Amino acid sequence: MNRFQESIYKLIVETSTNLPGDVRQAIQAARDQEDAGTRSALSLSTIADNIQMAECNVSPICQDTGMPTFIVHCPVGANQIVMRKQIIEAVAQATKDSKLRTNSVDSLTGANSGDNVGPGTPVIHFEQWERDDIEAKLILKGGGCENKNIQYSLPTELEGLGKAGRDLDGIRKCIMHAVYQAQGQGCSAGFIGVGIGGDRTTGYELAKHQLFRRADDVNPNEELRKLEDYVMENANKLGIGTMGFGGQVTLLGCKIGVMNRLPASFFVSVAYNCWAFRRQGVVIDPATGDIKEWVYPKGELVEMKKDEPAKQPHPNRRSAARLCCRRRSRKSKSASCAWAMS
């Protein structure tokens, strides 16, 4: 396990700077659906440029690098105490190298720890399994989209939708309301993870766990698969569009999970994630700590398409193609947010 910390550092850098291939494909599909020349289409084009520039410069995709949240599966007997310390060290090093922004703030004093380390940060969950390998997954979920999370306690009254009861129709109403009430905030078009059941804590945990599913997977639960399809079809009829500019695409993905609940409680929890859907994972050799494979498709396997006809680059900005001559360099320049790159 000599190189476990180095492997976690590589995971952090990859997650922060290189959007996974399945997420890129979802964004490409959205660009194909959007009406050319609209503000939403132009925003998606700028987002695509941002993704490519971040990859080429090994720079954060967004200025808000989010809350580092790790889920680590390890075999029985693995030293979780040592792994936790090395994950924390890797987070601090990535922050020092400007791959993560200093995001850990004392809730009482407002003081920033300066290295993303403090009470509650980073978030690390360990789970044992019966495999020999170690699997570490990471999601970087920013504050803007975190603020648009929402939880419903059924039955409830929803403005414009009426009563949402303790059934599939009520669940459907809650999910559609969650998308509508965001109104493009949290940097749409985005992805949602939904947790049905549990208590207030486990419901949100289940919702966030759905964000670790591949964007192109199919829910094995037939009822949930139909519900996911319904939400995707109808959410994209709301006309909210990218960044709330109006358009054909409001939602890029919907993943739903279910768990048992108490008889007296019925929660529907929705975790919203922006277009900068930064999650990646690695399978690690428990003997050496080396990375054996990546869990999600690497971003460079899906190059973001350029608009046709090609637009002339701004005179003060080099094109993404020229930037790629320094592809995946170790430089620590910060990529601008998509909406600031027009």
Image: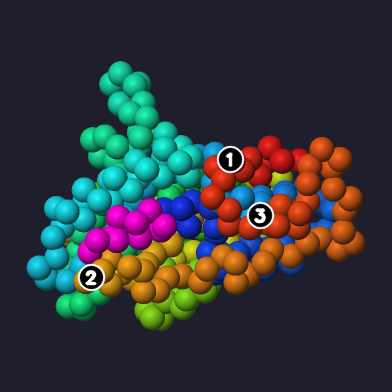
Q: Which mark is residue 326?
A: 3
Task: Residue 26: give x, y in percent of width and height.
Answer: 60, 66
Task: Residue 179: give x, y in percent of width and height.
Answer: 53, 52
| Mark 2 or mark 1, earlier in chain | 2
| Mark 3 or mark 2, earlier in chain | 2
Identity of the residue furthest to the left in this view: 77
Is residue 180 in view? no
Determine crowd level at label 3: few under 14, some 14-19, many 20+ residues with C-alpha closer than 10 A. some
| Mark 1 or mark 3, earlier in chain | 3
Residue 229 among magenta residues: no
Identity of the residue furthest to the front in this view: 2
Disc 1 target residue: 334
Q: Secondary structure at mark 2?
A: loop
* Callout 1 touching callout 3 (CB < 8 Å): no
Q: Is residue 43 left or right of residue 329?
A: right
Q: Quadrant of residue 25?
A: bottom right
Disc 2 target residue: 286
Q: CA distance from mark 1 to mark 3?
A: 14 Å
Residue type, mark 1 in image:
Ser
- Identify the residue at horizontal 54%, vertical 39% (top origin): 63
Identity of the residue furthest to the top in this view: 109
Residue bounds of the magenta highlight: 1-11
Q: CA distance from mark 3 to mark 2?
A: 33 Å
Q: Secondary structure at mark 1?
A: loop
Q: CA distance from mark 2 to mark 1?
A: 33 Å
- Identify the residue at horizontal 60%, vertical 72% (top origin): 301
- Identify the residue at horizontal 89%, vertical 50% (top origin): 312
